[in-house]
Image (tube, rainbow, N blue to C red):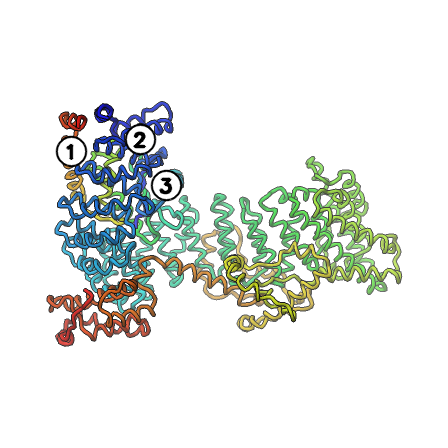
Amino acid sequence: MIHFVLLISRQGKVRLTKWYSPYSQKERTKVIREISGLMLHRGPKLCNFVEWGGLKVVYKRYASLYFCMCIDPEDNELETLEVIHHFVEILDRYFGSVSEQLYFLNLAYYILDELVIAGEIQESSKKTVARLISAQDSLVEAAKEEASSISNIIAQATK
Amino acid sequence: MAGPSMMETLFQRTLEDLIKGMRLQLIGESAFISKAVEEIRREIKSTDLHTKSIALQKLTYLNSLHDVDMSWAAFHAVECMSSSRFADKRIGYVAASQSFNESTPVLLLITNQLRKDLTSVNEHEASLALECLAKIGTVDLARDLTPEVFTLLSSSKVFVRKKSIGVTMRVFEKYPDAVRVCFKRLVENLESSDPQSLSATVGVFCELAAKDPLSYLPLAPEFYRILVDSKNNWVLIKVLKIFARLAPLEPRLAKKVTEPICEHMRRTGAKSLMFECVRTVVGSLSEYESAVKLAVVKIRELLLEDDPNLKYLGLHALSIVAPKHSWAVLENKEVVIKSLSDEDANIKLESLRLVMAMVSESNIIEISRVLVHYALKSDPEFCNEILGSILSTCSRNFYEIVMDFDWYVSLLGEMSRTPHCQKSEEIEFQLIDVGMRVRDARPELVRLARSLLIDPALLGNPFLHRILSAAAWVSGEYVEFSLNPFELAEALIQPRASLLPTSIRVVYLQSVFKILIFCVNSYLSQTETLADLEPEVPDSISQRENSEASDLASVRALFEREHDEAFNPGVLDRPSTDNSIEDIGNAADGDGQTSTFVSFRKNGFTRESIVNLVNLVEVAMRPLSVSLEVEMLERTCNILGLIEVLKRELPAVFQNEKVLEKEELEVLKLIKLMNDAFSEELGPVSTSAQERVPIPDGLVLKDNLADLDEVMGDVKLPSSSSFSLESPYNGQRMDPASCNVQSKEDSEASSESTSLLAEHRKRHGLYYLPSEGNGTISNDYPPANDLKSGDTNQDDTEDFVKLTAQSLVSKKKPNYAKPRPVVVKLDEGESVPVVLKKRDSRDDLLSGAVRDILLGDDAVKLSSSIKGKEKVNADPLDSKENMHDMENSSHRKSSSRRSKQRPHRKERGQTNPEKLGVEKEEHGGKVKSKSSHRHGRQKSRQKAEGSSDIIAETPVIPDFLL
């Protein structure tokens, strides 16, 4: 299974973390530090797998972002690379292009949730994910509109 | 209240504002964050849920990327979760799944909320709740929400169903009883026409089977169908993983799946699937020759790719094949060897592992040589990686694969001289260990020790100090094998030795002491016996003197070089050193015949040489006698004391008189005694040595200390993993008497252990070493260099690749000029604890929560399946067993359903007694063949769907459990 997903920028800034195995806050910090140290120091033409503490880290760089997933040693590395690519394609489809857009990183969580549950890949269809996300978006928008209408705010404030 | 709330709502910074602000901030990130958190703390208290959720969202963001604590906001997360607006709810759920853990107190509050959302008509809400449950599910949550998850497992909305399938894994893990409720529906999803549900289900089974394959064996036909029918690569990969775990349990299954797997391997264009097929074949189906051949062809394709990923995976796959099919590695040896110098550290490591996996007693010499050369060329990290793996491979199981210890000792020497070598601790240990265990290796060890000790350059490298310590100990302990003890002594007291840390200098000093005693003793006993012969051999003596003198001269040169380099000799007093050099220099007129020590050992101890040695040592020791280090001080004083005794009691020697006086014989005896004490052999000590000491009568040992065993149990284990030996330094520090006792015990122990070596000896046809009579090497012992040149006369300049290629190919055992020397192993006890420990840890690894419940052990199975027949209702008290019944029965169900499904769709939920019986037998785990038999029958049913089977199944009993 996937233990965690990290997105780290080339400068070592963390852009997204998602943990599927229980890690305490302290461990999370340590893991991020170790993994970014491992990944960022590797040259561009080396293989995308790193053994790390009995597990395997599969990473790939897209633009200035490192996408990284940590898997069990017996899991399929190439499949994980495909999953990463899949994720990136969905993000691409949704945002136009994968870059460090501001809103992107927050929504990426929801997209990842549609893709992976309990550390297992869920949805192999890009179209479905896009459809689900936009359905959720419209739900959110509806709620937002309701919330941000002035009358609503006044009602809230004066109640 | 109204005022601030409204202001906050209107002017609250959104997450986007926060991120933007963070990128543009000028006040420093941490300051910015703490300010933002302050703001969030204020906003989150708002009564307006929207404001609250935005604040929570910001906090979640800061927590995930900047490690801001958010445990204090747990209750706010619960509030947001309960919002009726999807936007707020989603934020709440994300925050909860990110920050909640088992110990979060508010977990108790969310059960109902989760239940409500799981049953919501809005599929997105249900999906949020599922995602959250998958992340934070606790035992309680899993138990309470099992019914809802069960309902969702057959939801008509694929989107929700597949998520609920994913969640079952977490639920099972936390609350194994849920298996009783959900397993059937989960299995049904294996037949789902919807690819997403199927994929999710296979994923769950893949994880479950990883923990406990045996329980899922009955589902094999379902998986087989997927393997043949599915077009989805990701599903196929998961199914292959399941088969990789099931196949070793059931040979017939392995036979059946081999063909479809090969078919996939041939046909697929996807490298991931192809690699998975390869891995399955080499890992679990390695006895199917044709499949393995195909897999190796594919591996070769991977190896020849330019993509480093594929190359790495190819090497990885090769290392899985290597133990069973070494030919696969031989076929690809060039690639493997070339990969040793790949730019990617991962690939290098993988190929190193592969090379080490190929090592056998016939090729270890070649492979080690190639690797050490690679170590010279590679970066420090990889260099040590190489050295470490050579050391651990060669020392495995008491140097099992080392046939030629002379070679191994010189390899150790070569490794210590490798730049960047940081394995000195291991080399130190092995030098001493080999010395103690392998008698025949001692001459070569002393030779190596000499070459290490006399090289002043090595003293400056702190990484080598441990090795030098071992060399010094070896030179003192086995000085009788030395061609030139004087040289050793001089090397040990060279001025640069002051660079060494005290702990190692004391070893040097003790060795000097031993060498001194040895030389004096040899000289005295020789004069005693050869006094009459002396006049007859003046020529040889003078020649020897010459050569010795030249040797001394070289030492002098060494001293002078030290001084020329303006090197600070530390505690050594410079003028006195110079004096000593003058002293030595007197005799020197070096004509360069240093190498003619033909009979030196027999009668090479001339009076002058002894006097010189004694003087030299004395001069070198004087300054040390005021050392502040107690250890050094004491040992220095010992040496000086000895010298004093010698000078006072043996004026004959020191004042040029040739005849030995009668009264001097007492000193002779003393020296002899000390020499004997030192030449008693130190042996390896078994960890169980203490147990062999007989307990004196009347000594009560066990009564009150019985429970110490428990306390010490775990303390003892680690030390036994690496065999402990008597620290050489301790042994040296002992006074002669106790040293005697010690070594007597040792030799006793080793003589006992020899009986255990009987079979070993038989195999190798070795002569056996008596436990008495140390230091006598057999005369027919061929010099190490001869052997080496005869056996492996390869030129160093030859291509390494070629070399290894040869060594890898040569399967025949090389003809050794001599049998393998005896390696002293003490007893079985030495290695047994290690094995036991390994087994324990493996058990630990396997003890996953699911496995405990699903598998139990065979005994539990048997009893539970019997109970399953008798008892119908679930008893909450032994839920474990009941759960197990459930498990069994669901398997029973599924398999019977499967075998019947086409002809008898309606008979679901029923099973026949005969089958139940067989099932029980299988789970009794007694007769393996029985289970395979049953399995075979199942398969034949699947194929033929014969009517006789259907008839046999007609007498059905109702299944109470489902």
Identify residue type, mark 3.
Answer: Gln
Q: Secondary structure at mark 2?
A: helix
Mark 1 and mark 3: span between their CA atoms?
Answer: 33 Å
Q: Is residue B658 among the parts visible in the rendering?
A: yes
- B778 sits to left or right of B313: right
Q: Label 2: which residue?
A: B41
Q: Marks 2 and 3: same chain?
A: no
Judged by depth in the image, the label closer to the viewer, 2 or 1, is: 2
Mark 2 and mark 3: span between their CA atoms?
Answer: 20 Å
Which residue is painted at 35% across and 49% down in the image? B311
Identify residue type, mark 1.
Answer: Glu
Q: Label 1: which residue?
A: A141
Query: Callout 2 environment at 10 Å: few (<14), some (14 to 19), or many (20+)?
Result: some
At which x and y percent is residue B409? 59, 56
Mark 3 falls within which chain?
A: A
Q: Marks 2 and 1: same chain?
A: no
For the N terminus of chain B, the quadrant is top left
Q: Label 3: which residue?
A: A25
Q: Secondary structure at mark 3?
A: helix
At which x and y percent is residue B226? 20, 59
